[in-house]
Each structure stands twice: as C-alpha cells, then as structure tokens.
Amino acid sequence: MRIVVVGSGASGVHFALSALERGHEVILLDVGNQRGTVPAPDATFSQLKDTLPDPAGYFLGLEGEGVVYPASRPSYYGHPPSKHYVFDVPAEFRASAESMEPMFSFAKGGFAEAWTAGCYAFAPEDLTDFPFDYEALRPHYDTVARRIGVGAADDDLARFFPRDASYLPPLPPDPHSAWLLARYAGRRAALNGALGFYLALARRHPEPGARQPAGLHPVRALPLGLPDRFHLPPGSNPHRMRALSGVPVRAGRARHSLRV
Amino acid sequence: MTDFASAAVLPRECSVFSRYLAGIEATPYLVEAYTRGHKYLPARQGTPDALDQALLRLARRGPWCARLADAYARRARPTGILRQKLVLQLAVLESSPPAHAWINSADIGPVPLVLARAAWAVGVSVLSLVAAIVVFGPLHLLAGLRPAGRAA
C-alpha cells in the first residue's frame, strides 16, 4: 500500500517508520520554515556562551528581541530567538484560546525542531472517545520513547504513580541544577517524612472517580491553565498557593476553546 | 529628556550596571550587546516621567548609586526604564563571558558561611531601601502632586 504521511515531526516519522517496517511504500510530505545553521552542535549550553562569536545575539536575539522585560507577558513556553523559525506564525493563520496556550509548529520537522525529550502519556479518560483504550496503547509507549527520545526519571510521586513506559535516561541537567538535585536527594527522606514535602511533577488522576492515592489532595485547578483533577502533595493547596506572589490560581474548571 | 537610549550614555550605563550586577568591568562586547538590546526596550515607546529620569540619572553615577536607585525602583517603578535596563544588562551578562559562569554558579560552602552571606545580602538590601526612601520618597511625593503633563 502507498501511504502519504503529512508532517515530518516526531509523530510523522514514527508512523512512517512503522509503515515501512510493515512493507508499505511511504511518501513523507512537509512544508514550513527551514532551520538555519546550528552553531557548535556538540557544545553544551554553557560552552555555547564561551565559544559563540556573539552569544548574546544567539540567546537574546541580535537586537535583544528575546529579552523578557518586567510587565511584558511572556509566553509560557519560552523559547530563544534561535528557535523562532519553529513558531513564526504565517500571516494567514488564526487561532484563539481561553485558559490555555496551545502550541503550533510551523517548521519543517514540526516540534521535533524544538524537542526537549519531554512527552506525557495519555490518561485513560483522554481516550474515552477513541476506538481503543489505554491498555491497548501501553505496549507501544516503549517503542515511541526509544525512537523519538523520551526521557524520564522517578520523582517523589513515583511511588503513587508508577511509570507508564520504559523511558530513556533523562537529559543531563546543567551543573547548577545537578547540584541542587543532588543536595535534595540527600535530604529527600527527611523532607518527605517530617515535612510532607515532595518534589514532583503534578500528576493527573488515573481515571475519573478512582480512589485517590492516600496522602494526596485533589485540586480543582492548577496554575497555567492545566485541566482539573490534578494532585498536589500534602501541605499544598490552592488557598496556600494563592498567597504566593506571582502564582495565579483560578478556581473552578479550566475552560478552553480553539478556533483555527 | 530623550537620552535614555543615546549612544553617548549607554557605555557609561553598561559599565556601571556591570559592576553593580556582577562586579566586573564591561568589555567592549558587553557594551555593544547592551547598546544593540535597546532597540526592543519597551521604554522606547514612551517618555519617562520625572521619577524614572531621576532614578536613571542617579543609577548612572556608580554601582552604589545604582543599588540605591534599584532598591527604590523595584517597589516604586518595577516596570520603569531603570528596571528594564537592568534586566537587559543582566540578560547580556548571563548570556556571555566573562560573567555568565559566576551568575549561574551555586553559592556553595559551609552552612554558616552561606547564611552569613545571605544575612549580609539581606542587610544591604534593607539599608539600601531605607536610604532610597529617604532620597527618593520626597521626590516621588512631589512628582505625584504636580499637575498632569508637567511631571517630565
């Protein structure tokens, strides 16, 4: 069978390879902004600052257009000017949203051009309108993680929410973050036990109506427009988060709409 | 006053802000990057008022004056021109040598030493704010009492 795949992002190439392995003929189509030359592709983040001829121009933009000033409204998904080609919106494209910030890629290669090795599995309730369920998908997460590079490490909530696939090791953190994580690891048991402090990514409830893991509080809505039914560790709740400067917490269910 | 983006004052600003923020002398590259960054400075869209101008003028005099002006600006003019320029300079310093390694380094050491450094930083901040209120408070009140359109 001849199959035409539109889009050469992470999903497109994964599907194309799967189809090729099954003996199909694949035509992969893509269009969009072209990536420029990548300077020093083997250099680390810190090394770029020392080796590039114009590091400020690379990280902040040639005329500082990437600097986020006080009172400006930065995108939640901040990205440097060197990645603008991924998100530069064509004049004819229109989109609007409420309580969420959808991402669109306009580059050849899709979001793989700005890949950070982070990707989250569907929850069972995400798939209620699909002709397959979560258990049918589960075995394939390992393959996807290996092919496109999805990394993960256990955090403090892993005991309540086990991993859903065998992910690759996480990308190495910068030296400062590595030091902080190492220091935290040495105090993890004491902080988890005595203070009820957990360092973890907020998780979505496994399924509607399911019994919540002991010791975790359900939260109706979290900052940044995330949907409801998230959990925070003991000691955290929206009322306390409201008291934190600069943390917007909206009550009620997050709504979103999208017009394209 | 329209000189806040003038090529005549920016090297001096860059030099003072580099010493205030990172304790280093500005290199020709830092001056060039700081100057370039002014093209997208939001303050270019308007005219700074009297307090903004006074804060910027004092900040240009030296690192300690910059600290004083910054202490007041972060409460009275958190989005004003001085804070915008300091954000720009910090972004340039964090992105390039020779200061990026120092800015991104962790304050590592024995706990008492780290606490002592933190206490010193807090003390300096509090004293700076008190001094800044003494210096700029009256000017701020005066500017607020002036009729609209005459503050600048």
Image (tube, helix red, strand yellow):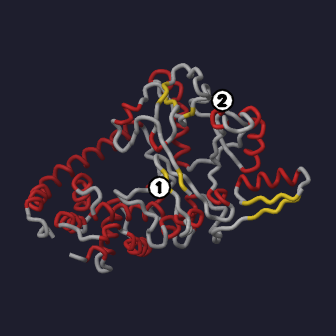
Q: Residue at x 57, y 29 (%)?
A: A205
Give how far across and how far down residue A259 sits, in percent: 54, 55
Q: Which mark is residue B119?
A: none
Image x and y of residue A226, in percent: 50, 41
On-image quarter of the N terminus of chain B:
bottom left
Q: Please determine whether, in this image, residue B7 is positioned above or below residue B72.
A: below
Residue that mark 1 sits on: A75
Which residue is pictured at 28% across the width and 65% down the height? B81
Badge 2 element? loop
* Residues at marks 1 and 2, CA–CA distance in whole angstroms: 31 Å
Which residue was labeled with disc 2? A162
Residue at the image position 59 percent from the left and 27 percent from the top: A208
Residue closest to the eye, B50 or A225:
A225
Tell us which disc is closer to us: 1 or 2: 1
Residue A211 found in image quarter: top right
The type of residue carrying mark 2 is: Pro
Q: Residues within 10 Å of mark 2 (few under 14, many from 20)?
A: few
